[in-house]
Amino acid sequence: MYDGRTFNCIGEQVLNTREKQSHSVSHLVPKVDKELCISCGNCVDLCPDVFVWDDEGKAEVSNPGGCSTQCNCQEAAESCPTDAISLEE
């Protein structure tokens, strides 16, 4: 029986508009420590609307507000092999 939930292509539950409005979203702001960044690309691949490449080939944050609406920045931070990404409120 269908329970009304919607899932994206990787099986994560997607909230409808009403649920998004009432859902408590932490507004985390990502920061990249460029001295630790080894340009692995995990963050850019996971959150291309938030992380981009700078002129030196290091990751940088292009849209700090995108974590709450466009991607899971926590996952991007956890995927960083050098812990170059921190999340601050």
Image (spheres, rainbow, N blue to C red):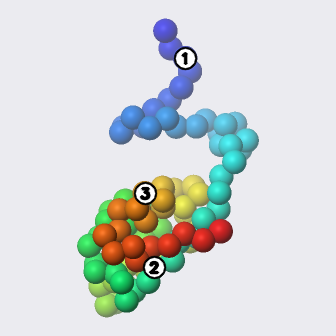
Q: Earlier in the sequence, mark 1 or mark 2?
A: 1
Residue at 34 percent of width and 81 percent of height: 37
Looking at the picture, does residue 75 appear above or below residue 7? below
Q: Which numbered disc, 1 or 3, marks the residue closer to the eye? A: 3
User: Within 10 angstroms of label 3, few (less than 14), some, or many (20 or more) residues?
Assistant: few
Residue at 48 percent of width and 61 percent of height: 73
User: Within 10 angstroms of label 2, few (less than 14), some, or many (20 or more) residues?
Assistant: some
In the shown orientation, is residue 83 left or right of residue 14? Answer: left
Q: Pick the residue in front: 74 or 44.
A: 74
> Mark 2: which secondary structure?
strand
What's the CA distance linking mark 1 and mark 3?
28 Å
Instruction: Give the image location of residue 16, x and y in percent.
Output: 61, 35
Q: How many discs appear? A: 3
Three-letter residue code for mark 1: Asp
What's the CA distance linking mark 1 and mark 2?
40 Å
Taking the view exactly as shown, the residue that stands out farthest to the top is 1
Q: Pick the residue in front: 61 or 37.
A: 37
Residue 4 visible somewhere in the drawing: yes
Q: Earlier in the sequence, mark 1 or mark 3?
A: 1
Residue at 50 percent of width and 29 percent of height: 6
User: Within 10 angstroms of label 1, few (less than 14), some, or many (20 or more) residues?
Assistant: few
Residue 53: image quadrant is bottom left
Residue that numbered label 3 is attached to: 75
> Mark 3: which secondary structure?
helix
Three-letter residue code for mark 3: Glu
Residue that numbered label 1 is attached to: 3
Residue that numbered label 2 is attached to: 32
